[in-house]
Image (spheres, rainbow, N blue to C red):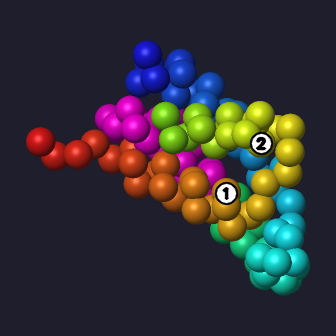
Amino acid sequence: MLLRPSIRRRTARSLRELPRYVGPASAAVGSLSLVREEMPAAAFAVEELAERLEGDLPVDVRGVALARVLLAEGAGIFYSRVRADVLLSNAGEALRALTPALR
């Protein structure tokens, strides 16, 4: 089910909304300027993930599932602001997991 093209497209469309919900990290994590610098990288990583999901190449179901977790974690990113560094890390993990393992 997660590998259906319609699910992949819908997930990609929703992922493209994430960067506008990225907020600054807390003072305990790092400085505000560092987080501002991470926002473009987070947005780029999410866009790259969305493009891969929409593409024609085969994907691993684990990567699709991780991409959907970005949308659903803790009541959903849409309901609370997420830190740029967390989004960057999670998007990168999902992107790496999209590549099917050689068997």
Q: Residue at x 43, y 16 (%)?
A: 1
Q: Residue at x 58, y 55 (%)?
A: 90
Q: Residue at x 79, y 54 (%)?
A: 82
Q: In this figure, which residue is indicated by the disc labeled 2? A: 77
Secondary structure category for the residue under label 1? helix
Secondary structure category for the residue under label 2? helix
The amino acid type, in three-letter code, at marker 2 is Ile
Q: In this figure, which residue is indicated by the disc labeled 1? A: 87
Residue 17 in sight from this viewpoint = no
Image quadrant where residue 37 sits: bottom right
Write the start and end of the magenta stretch as one range.
44-64
**Does label 2 or label 1 sit earlier along the sequence?**
2
The image shows residue 25 at horizontal and vertical percentages of 82, 69
Q: Residue at x 39, y 48 (%)?
A: 97
Position of residue 63 relative to residue 86, above or below, is above
Location of the C terminus by quadrant is top left
Position of residue 90 relative to residue 69, above or below, is below
Disc 2 to disc 1, C-alpha distance? 10 Å
Residue density around tag 2, few if under 14, some if 14–19, many if 20 or more, within 10 Å: some
The amino acid type, in three-letter code, at marker 1 is Leu
CB atoms at circles 2 and 1 under 8 Å apart? Answer: yes
